[in-house]
Image (cartoon, rainbow, N blue to C red):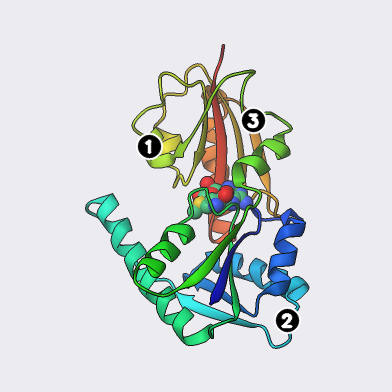
Amino acid sequence: MRTITLVGIGAGHPDHLTLQAVEAIGKAEVFFVIEKGTAADQLVALREAILARFARKPGWRLVRIADPRRAAAGDYGAAVADWHAARARLFADAIGRELPDGSHGAVLVWGDPALYDSAIRILGVVAADGLSFQLDVIPGISAPQALAAAHRIPLNRIGEPIHVTTGRRIAQGLSPEVDSTVVMLDDGTGLATIDPHGLDIWWGAYLGTPDEVLMAGPLTEIRDAIMALRAERRAAVGWIMDTYLLRRRA
Ligand SMILES: C[S@@+](CC[C@H](N)C(=O)[O-])C[C@H]1O[C@@H](n2cnc3c(N)ncnc32)[C@H](O)[C@@H]1O
């Protein structure tokens, strides 16, 4: 039986790796990584640096999988389902070819594998299609946790819920019932669209990396500055990942 471990590696700082993650990396012989062929492949470079430090099995290998293109327009759900199916086929081929029975493979997953990441679902499809392996998941530090630590804030007010959602969703409005909203996967549209009145924001980009930038304050006052910094950093670095907490003032 093959074993595949999804290892949460944290949101950008190499020291986000847990001892459990270090141990799992040390046991694996084959590491699978998806490459997009974009500037964001700097994220692949961080994974390679982690492997150079913590992969231990003699002869361990990195297997690169080219990311299939995702349809840009049309039905979002259908486009994502097609993209996941294409990724699952590529994973199944790579596992069948590169991971002999009885050996141990791993996928280094950005942040935590349970939060806005497709790896668990994709390996579920691979298993349902007939390839048998034992799946293990190691949790990692997620971007919202890195954001809260960087700003030295709790994500929730005492006893209150938090809504974690995407930029696409908040472009349609914030939940009326929940005052604290953590936003991920925003291409800038959500932040630009939201009604800023009565909201405070704690924003962070490139959290945990040497490029980390943070801003916080009333959204009416600092949204333009965040949008300008976001555009400037994106142009300079070639990509951007940001996460922010929006909170309705009590
Ligand atoms: C595909 S999701 C992956 C989330 C990841 N599994 C996690 O647990 O944080 C990518 C989104 O995570 C957030 N993100 C990940 N790393 C980040 C970082 N270092 N700084 C800011 N946001 C980050 C951004 O909102 C980005 O659009």
Amino acid, disc 2: Lys
Helix, strand or loop for disc 3: strand
**Is the CB atom of the residue marked by disc 2 within 8 angstroms of ligand 1's nearest atom?**
no
Residue corresponding to mark 1: 169
From mark 3 to mark 2, how far is it between C-alphas?
44 Å
Decide if residue 96 is on the left or right side of residue 138.
left
Amino acid, disc 3: Ala
Residue appearing at x 47%, y 77% in the figure: 65
- Decide which of tag 3 and tag 2 comes sooner along the chain: 2
Residue 139 in the image: above or below residue 181: below
Numbered mark located on residue 57 in the image: 2
State if disc 1 and disc 2 touch (CB < 8 Å): no
- Decide which of tag 2 and tag 1 comes sooner along the chain: 2
Amino acid, disc 1: Arg
Q: Quadrant of residue 44?
A: bottom right
**Is the CB atom of the residue marked by disc 1 within 8 angstroms of ligand 1's nearest atom?**
no
Residue appearing at x 60%, y 41% in the figure: 144
Residue placed most toward the observer, 213 or 11: 11
Q: Quadrant of residue 243?
A: top right
Residue corresponding to mark 3: 216
Which is more foreground, mark 1 or mark 3?
A: 1
Residue appearing at x 66%, y 49% in the figure: 141
